[in-house]
Amino acid sequence: MSPDGPIAYPLTTRGDIVDTLFGRTISDPYRWLEGDVRHDARVQAWVEAEAGLTEAYLAKLPGRAAIRERLTGLWNYERVSLPLRRGGRYFHLRNSGLDAQPVLCVRDRLMAEPRVLIDPNGWSDDGATALGEWEVSRDGRRLAYAVQDGGSDWRTVRILDVDSGETLADEVHWVKFSALAWAGNGSGFFYSRFPEPEAGAEHQASNLDHAVWFHRLGTAQEQDFLVHATPDRPRLTHVAEVTQDGRWLLISSAEGTEARYELTLIDLTAEKLLPRTLVRGLENDWRLAGTAGDLFYFVTDLEAPRRRIVSIDVASEMRRRREIIAEGHDLIADARVVGERLLVSVLRDVASELRIYDLEGRLMDHVGLPAVGAVAAMDGEGGDPEAFFAFTSYDRPTEIHRLDVTTGATSMFARPPLSFDPSEFVVEQTACTSRDGTVVPIFVLRRRDVVSPAPTILYGYGGFEISLTPGFSPAALGWAAMGGVYAVANIRGGGEYGKAWHDAGRRANKQNVFDDFIAAAEHLMARGIAARKGLVIHGHSNGGLLVAAVTNQRPELFAAALPGVGVHDMLRFNRFTAGRYWIDDYGDPGVEEDFATLLGYSPIHNICHGADYPAILIATADTDDRVVPAHSFKYAAALQAADIGPKPHLIRIETRAGHGAGKPLAKQIEEVADLWAFAAYWSGLRL
């Protein structure tokens, strides 16, 4: 088999299932591929045949081994997370370079040598069992941590004694979409879970009846105390956090993925834990920035699409709200109460600025950032002027800075030594005009000596109010180092310009997302940045949907398409695991108006028979219980059965991996090497 020779695809049985939906007849011949690959022998056999075909094809691609070697070198740098200060100690994650999973460390003083507390690299032979969420008690003596196996969203929570390194006997199961929040006295922690699913349905059944529980140390899970549940509203999810003083439990409840919350408050010092509603209605975003006594500071989009900061006096009967920082031209991305200050991160045309205000909202200082890039995270506490923030850009690996919010002075906590010279690369920002006249920003990364037009990868997401801010990626830098151009389009549906930007790309407005991405592709070609027959599109999750949809709409525009873990059956997405949450962004297939919109772009329902499609390499994973792999299975089968030209339409199926989180580093590198080798061959990038 040569990379551009004919391909004999495995025979995929066509079923005869036909649905009649709102007067439309919808054929679903590959519904049998919705069976769980772990238990369904027919699906297993199909997966094995497709995986064998794809591996044989990828093995023929030139430069695959060299790409893998280059990526391995770029990934081999130290990565340190924001430190969490508890009981005078500092806790953080660290990957020394090529560890399969990061390890959790503690420092007894700020710049002391780190001591390893948890090393998940020995938890499984294949490195696919990972450390998930973790939280430390206020006194720094106990650590609650979640274990994630094989990429699944399910978690098992365990407890570590920090001083002795001993793992306690406590275990909490069936935790998902949860924070871990310690009681102020360290007696136990709050967490969120679903009821235990039926055997065999763990990775496909819809997630309902989320609830907040309290686990007391030294007891069995069967004795855990139910803190908050909404059996009359089973679609709600609930996430709990405890205020710094240990007095209040704040529960944020949502029905979908859109940031529209109800807030419930419980006084943990009261004799009975009685919930009271702080914010009702599921109408607005509310993110706790911190507290000062009975004043709670929130970032909210209430009457402010680009967000503002308000305080709520939780001790007052009227729950009085007061505006602290008004909505401005720039998007408020995040805020923290630190010391006697508000540390506020904003986005200006997708790049970060960091500002310090007093608690009355008066601007006190601007924090100097190292370059044009993104404040990826920040943390600190009231009463303590010490804060930390992570800074990154496309050509700058994440570095951790310490900030004194009283003086505005910064110092370096962690900066990785580099295996490349950043001066050899250029990061630029351009913009295109979409079909309706909307201006859409695009970031472009290239090697300084690369002469355009060049083979280009265009990445996008466009959903769920997620912002694609400048951030370091060994994968992106690897493509640029190979002589290609890597571009990122900040299309609508994301959160780069606030709620209005998101709303303009969801539900009935979803076509704007595809129009923006197509406009970005055309702009890169018109500007002479991308080679006209050398443009590859790439996206992950909702971005996988994006790539598949625009491939159907403009197949002639692209040399190759790389849809990863995508949502491809828009008429059935809400039937599996977390799919029901996505109705906020996509609409409800059971509502006629939404159904018509979804059918209009659903990837498996809009393949253009007779068109000449680009080369396509789909990526999914067998343990993905976020976007179940059936989406990709059915899409691959439909592509391979269609008359869409001779280029390859293949599917890469990772084993013992999920939607992305917890994937061991070797698997990450292997996947990107396969994708980039495929993209290089079909875009004309010669190594």
Image (tube, rainbow, N blue to C red):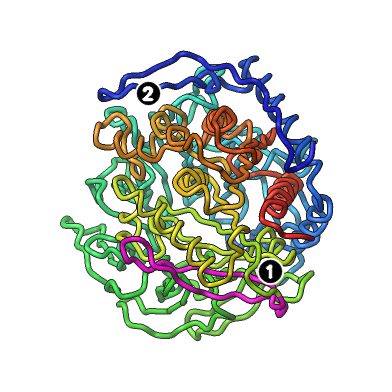
Where is residue 466? Give x, y as percent: 44, 56
The amino acid type found where label 2 is placed reads Ile
Quadrant location of residue 115?
Answer: bottom right
Question: Which residue is at a point 31% across and 48% down the rendered structure image?
Answer: 261
Question: Which residue is at a point 64% across and 72% down the rendered structure image?
Answer: 452
The amino acid type found where label 1 is placed reads Arg
The residue closer to the viewer here, 450 or 340, is 450
> Does 477 sit above or below residue 423?
above
Where is residue 488? Give x, y as percent: 53, 63
The residue closer to the viewer here, 154 or 380, is 154
Extent of the magenta region: 423-449
Res 393 seen here:
yes
Q: Which SS class for mark 2?
A: strand
Magenta-span inclusion, residue 441: yes
The residue beneath circle 1 is 109
The residue beneath circle 2 is 26
Where is residue 27? Give x, y as percent: 42, 21
Q: As drawn, is 431 to the left or to the right of 619? A: left
